[in-house]
Image (cartoon, rainbow, N blue to C red):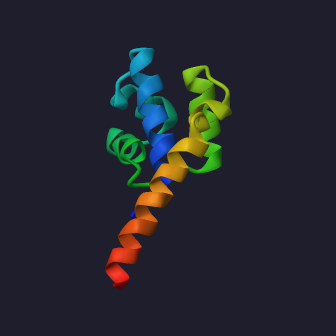
Amino acid sequence: MPHPVDILAGARLRTRRKEIGISQAALGLSSGITFQQIQKYENGANRISLSRLSEFAIMLKVPISYFFEALPERIERRLKQRRKRDRRANV
């Protein structure tokens, strides 16, 4: 299961990409990866390395912190859901 931070970073990547009107294919091409890999990042299926995230920040004209805005609230919510599910599985 993807970690909440990976999901958040991917969701923020998608949000910003759409805000400035760049397709997954164009972002992938400019960063030397496939649009399928962009999809995996955006869905949280694959983790975005810090070096790749810094490249995206430059391309999308945002500070790297943009990808982590709302982090505490989202992580806490996801961790609570995960703990709850784990408790049910252990019963």
Q: Residue furthest bottom?
A: 91
What's the residue at 45%, 15% (across, down)?
Answer: 20
Classify 21 as above or below 13: above
In the rendered image, which quarter is residue 84 located in?
bottom left
Q: Is residue 59 visible?
A: yes
x then y, percent, for residue 74: 51, 44
What's the residue at 36%, 69% (across, down)?
Answer: 85
In the visual, does 47 lie left or right of 38?
Answer: right
Classify 5 as above or below 63: below
Q: How many marks?
A: 0
x then y, percent, for residue 63: 67, 27
Q: Is residue 2 visible?
A: no
In the visual, does 75 lie left or right of 10?
Answer: right
Classify 24 as above or below 71: above
What's the residue at 35%, 24% (across, down)?
Answer: 23
Task: Quarter of the image for the C terminus: give it.
Answer: bottom left
In the visual, does 85 lie left or right of 49?
Answer: left
Task: Quarter of the image for the N terminus: give it.
Answer: bottom left
What's the residue at 45%, 41% (across, down)?
Answer: 10
x then y, percent, for residue 82: 42, 64
